[in-house]
Image (tube, rainbow, N blue to C red):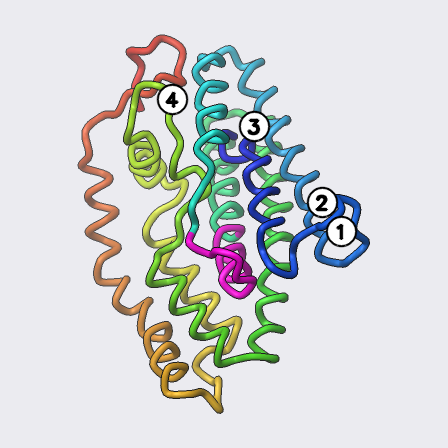
Amino acid sequence: MITEEALPTYQTRINSTKCFHDETGVDNTPWAIWARAWSAEENRHGDLLNKYLFLSGRVDMKQIEKTTQYLIQSGLDIGTGEDPYLWTIYTSFQERAAFISHGNTAKLAMQHGDVKLAQVCGIIASDEKRHETAYTKIAAKLFELDPNEMVIAFADMMRRKIKMPAHLMYDGHDHNLFDHFAIVASRIGVYTARDYRETVELLVAKWKVEKLTGLTSEGREAQDYVCRLAQRMRRLEERAIAKAQKAPTIPFSWISGSGVAS
């Protein structure tokens, strides 16, 4: 929910990317129309989850709101600059991660008897899936039009590693808040290193990276790197998952009664 609530940062980031920017705020270009519609849906996600948490009575809303404020204030650095190729690859990956994490949260909610939360997260997951579909199709067209530069951008993005939008979040207490959050997310199966690796495999297959031809030497090097990446990641994922499982219990200021941990 905190990630969804930091929407002003994402809208600003979109508008600083070539091709995607909305110069007047009401541009009639396909990119601008898409960006505004996307922002409207993400705003709905944040509002809905915020109200759910407030009404649940199980969280410290003051700490939740502080974390959101700090996150918007901090911004984000995802390493895409103004490059639309990097941006489209990043969003394809990140929207997939959002779909997976909301979907797995829905499954956990259902397992624990919270049907309403399961429905909420399931609906949001379906929205994120549509976002993923849109960005992966845009990227697929770019691979068709400019395969060499796109595969180089793909390799560049993978070397940087995909940073989730909330990687700079802070609650006024824990300076490693996102790392701790990621450990718990992995431990309970919301999002793991396996999900990351499977997304890499999915995108390589969807964009037919192995079949790209007519590449420069730099392009072929990038192609080789990307196509071999999932295999290298597979060797490390079990170690990462096991590390999360063995991590000590972590307290969060968000949970009512600050002594409560996850």
Spot the residue most to the front.
23
- The residue sitting at 43% across, 59% down in the picture is 199
Label 3 or label 2, whichever comes before in sequence order: 2
Q: Nearer the viewer, mark 3 or mark 2?
A: 2
Residue 193: x %, y % from top left:
32, 51
Foreground of the two, 119 or 1 = 1
Whether residue 80 is situated above or below residue 41 in the rendered picture? below
Report the amino acid beneath label 4. Asp
Report the amino acid beneath label 1. Ile
Residue 202: x %, y % from top left:
46, 65
The residue carrying mark 1 is 33
Does the magenta segment cover residue 88? yes
Residue 242: x %, y % from top left:
20, 45
CA–CA distance in space, label 3 to label 2: 27 Å
Residue 112 lies left or right of residue 230; in this view the side is right
Looking at the rendering, which quadrant does residue 224 occupy? bottom left
Residue 117: which disc? 3
The residue carrying mark 4 is 171
Report the amino acid beneath label 2. Arg
Residue 83: x %, y % from top left:
52, 62
Question: Element type at marker 2?
Answer: helix
The residue carrying mark 2 is 36
Does the magenta segment cover residue 245? no
